[in-house]
Image (cartoon, rainbow, N blue to C red):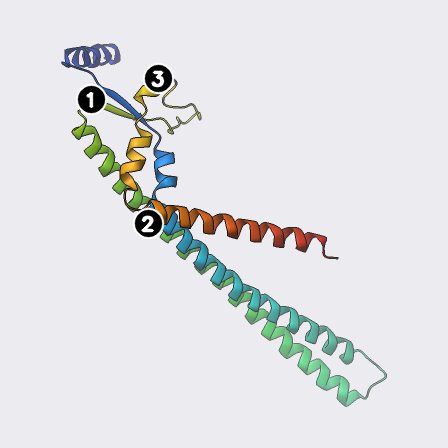
Amino acid sequence: FICVAALWAVALLAAEPKLKIGVVNMETLFDGYYKTKLANAKLRGQAEIYRDYLKKLNDRRGQLRDEYFKARDESQNIAVSKDERGKATKLAQELTDKLRELDAEIRQYSEDKQKQMKMEFDNNIQKLVREIRQLVDSYAVRHKFTLVLDSSGRTSNAIPTVLFHKDRLDITKPLAKELNMGHEEEIKKLDAELEKKSKTESTKLRRDRLMP
């Protein structure tokens, strides 16, 4: 049956008056799409806000831990009165409860924000891929392509779906140009901001590693 189907497909292709095949790297189109860059910039901004708030929670947790250890040590100090040790024991228990509540808040906040960002990321991908697909379809129809293949695809065995093609078949560049028409300066600005931010974060990381 498979052989018959393959022969039928070949026969259909042979029957085409003029077979025209195009190859496009969808990954390159997606990464270079100005809307992808805008969406990623927005997500990075949100992630930074979430990290800053999480840092505040963890800083607060560190303060509570210091207060707890101080109270615990005070509760075990035989040099102070029994009454003072009792107060310190009570304070240590209260701080333990606060730490437990704060740990739960940190865990819940982290899980909620990760889910929220993943959902937004997935939604962005679906929406943007749909827009790119629409352009590829339109381009293929306008330029009378019989077949357009994605050269960035992989099989389940990580084998490229397109093993070979001549450069003249690649239509990624003209598609990218049409996809981002009128937004060239915006792309340059977004790329520059990303590069600047990456350098800043890299410098901060190296400085943190050098700190004792």
Q: Secondary structure at mark 1?
A: loop
* Amino acid type of the residue tagged 2 in the rendering: Asn
Lateral position of residue 208 relative to residue 130, left or right = right
Residue at numbered disc 3: 166
The mark that comes first in sequence, 3 or 1, is 1
Q: Secondary structure at mark 2?
A: helix
The quarter of the image holding the N terminus is top left
* Amino acid type of the residue tagged 3 in the rendering: Lys
Q: Nearer the viewer, mark 2 or mark 3?
A: 3
What crowding class fits label 3: few (fewer than 14 Cα within 10 Å), some (14-19), or many (20 or more)? few
Q: Nearer the viewer, mark 1 or mark 2?
A: 1
In-front residue for pair 189/151: 189
> Which dot marks residue 19?
none
Residue at image position (51%, 52%) is 197
Q: Residue furthest right?
A: 79
Residue at image position (53%, 49%) is 198
Q: Position of residue 22 (x, y in %)?
A: 27, 23
Is residue 121 in sight in this rendering? no
The mark that comes first in sequence, 1 or 2, is 2
Residue at numbered disc 2: 123
Q: Position of residue 24 (x, y in %)?
A: 32, 28
The mark that comes first in sequence, 2 or 3, is 2
Lateral position of residue 93 relative to residue 39, left or right = right
What crowding class fits label 2: few (fewer than 14 Cα within 10 Å), some (14-19), or many (20 or more)? few
Residue at numbered disc 1: 146
Q: Secondary structure at mark 3?
A: loop
In-front residue for pair 27/57: 27
